[in-house]
Image: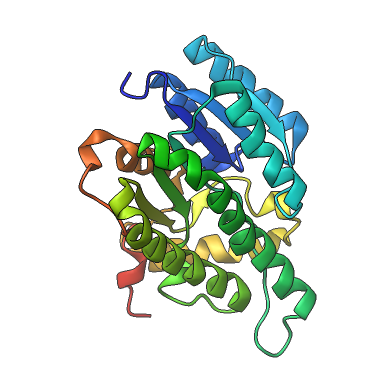
Amino acid sequence: MEFFEKVVLITGAAGGIGKETALKFAKAGANLVITDCNSSELQKVGKECELVSKIEPLLIIAELTNETDIEKIIDETVLRFSSLHILINIAGIPGFGTIENTSLGLFDNIFKVNVRAPFQLTSKAVPHLVKTKGIIINISSQCSVRPYPGMLAYCMSKSAIDQMTKCIALELADKGIRVNSVNPGVVKTNFSENNNIDPIKIENIKKRYTEKCPLKRMADAEEIANAILFLCSDSASFITGGNFLIDGGWHLSVT
């Protein structure tokens, strides 16, 4: 129960990595604030978390491209718990396109969700994290360090998250705040399906990944959640500014 009475805010908590991370922290005794734009799925996750911890999480339905909603997330968290110890920015969207066919609309939407939203939410959370010498975890991607064909804007957005992680870690170190990113490979979640991507394209990505990945498989969402939990624990007390690849060695593949 290392996180007993710690206040943990998780975005993108309605499924996949966000859901598994919420359940991990619930089992570890945290006071959870979970947010997502998918109301029905978030309600289900909230009930699961309460079952394992006997602590009712705070659920906030929010659209992270809405500045008012981001203000609401922080305001309601502090109103309910009076503090914030850990911020985990998980919410994000994929997107496909090359320099020849990526529209500015798609580019802007990816950056609004994947970069601008965590930037704003983190900015609003920092004054509260300073008081608790808190922790920030950003979910990036293997695509931040190795380009994936046909995902230009997405790869760019995750590279931005890596750099944001390093800059914030440097800026906030003297305030006792640790900041790291977790960079997963392809994970067995409903992430792509929930973003209306062609199922054939999804299967092709999964097939290519498992063929090239040294461990010859995708990750389970729980494996990524385990890494997040570790980086938030006292066992990681001297770790900050890192971008941690958890991709089964995919970044080592030569083809």
Q: Is residue 64 visible?
A: yes
| Quarter of the figure with the N terminus | top left
Q: Is residue 14 visible?
A: no
Q: Quadrant of residue 228?
A: top left
Q: Is residue 105 above or below residue 70?
A: below
In x, y percent, where is residue 41? Answer: 71, 31
Q: Residue at x 73, y 41 (%)?
A: 62
| Quarter of the figure with the C terminus | bottom left
Nearer the observer, 135 or 160: 135
In x, y percent, where is residue 235? Answer: 21, 37
Nearer the observer, 178 or 89: 178
Q: Residue at x 64, y 56 (%)?
A: 117
In the figure, is residue 206 to the left or right of 231? right
In x, y percent, where is residue 75? Answer: 65, 34
In the figure, is residue 15 to the left or right of 135? right
Nearer the observer, 117 or 84: 84
Q: Is residue 152 above or below residue 143?
A: below
Q: Quadrant of residue 213?
A: bottom left
In the figure, is residue 79 to the left or right of 207? right
Q: Residue furthest bottom?
A: 100
Q: Is residue 171 above or below residue 179?
A: below
- Total labels: the figure holds 0
Q: Quadrant of residue 56?
A: top right
In x, y percent, where is residue 79? Answer: 62, 25
Q: How is the image coloured?
A: rainbow
In the figure, is residue 219 to the left or right of 98? left
